[in-house]
Image: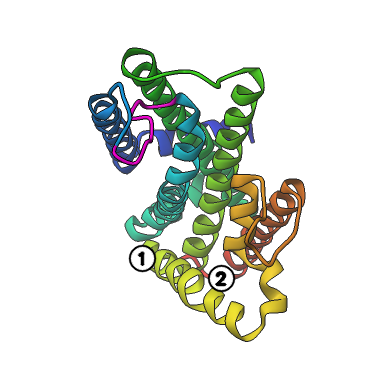
Amino acid sequence: MTALLASELRRILSRRLVRVVFALAVLGILIAAVVVALKSKEGLSTFGVDRRFHLTDLRGALEGTSPILVIASWLLGASFIGADWHTGTMTTLLTWEPRRARLLLAKAAACVTVVFLLVMAVQTVLAGSLTLAAVLRGTTEGTSGAWIRSAAGIAVRVGAMSAVGAAIGFAIASVSRNTAAALGVGFGYVVVIENLVRGLRPQWTQWLLADNAVILITGRSNGLVVHRSVMQAGLLLGLYAALLVLVAIAVFRARDVA
């Protein structure tokens, strides 16, 4: 299993899409940090607001970029397994490792691990660049040990939610054997089905993906119908991802590969 997992880790890290997405994310962050630094100035605005960039706004930046990171993670998870089906690599892999459950589980584990680490790396770049902008052109007032722990907690929870998104995208693409199908199902579910549930069956809102994701990332349920702790929301989302991966494994074992 160790050799199989190492092989899948090398495969996903060698994919061009992974490198391109990571490079674009870093480039976008660096450009945004430069813009933030240039717009940070001494004095007050016409509305009496301090025009300097405050490092304490990093929490909001981490939360604000989380939807983009989760969507990108969903894409990476879906494309990783979808590409294997599209190119016929899956058949070749089964000649080396015929135990299907073992193979798909290794793929899912590699995908989730890489996505989590990449998202954490992207957030580290974001935190570092905004910290530099605050030191040079803004202010670090209000930052303390408690604030650092809080910001780090948000980053870790965003990474965890991104891993959940990657696992769900992976599972759907595995069942459908298509990357686009996984993206379409995800869009349709979050935009259409969840909104219908909120309108027609508001009592079911506590089980919805998006609402629990908000709780997990922000650490609060203010303004939401759902009232769960961060731990409860995280466990529920992890359970959803695990169940979908198990369904994908069951389908993979039962269905003809060719």
Find residue 2 and report its horizontal and vertical position in percent.
Answer: 62, 31
Label 2: element kind: loop
| Circles 2, 1 touching at the beta carbon (< 8 Å) | no
Q: Residue at x 63, y 33 (%)?
A: 153
Circle 2 crowding by C-alpha within 10 Å: few under 14, some 14–19, many from 20: few
Q: Is there any visible trace of residue 97 in the rendered image?
A: no
Closer-to-camera residue (195/38) = 38
Q: Which residues are magenta?
A: 46-54
Q: Would you place residue 227 above or below residue 97 in this image?
A: below
Viewer-proximal residue among 32 and 9: 32
The residue depicted at 47 percent of the width and 62 percent of the height is: 173
For disc 2, the marked residue is 255
Say which mark, if any, is on residue 171. none
Q: Residue at x 37, y 27 (%)?
A: 53
Q: Which mark is residue 180?
A: 1
Which quarter of the image is occupied by the C terminus?
bottom left
Badge 1 amino acid: Ala
Answer left or right for 58 relative to 4.
left
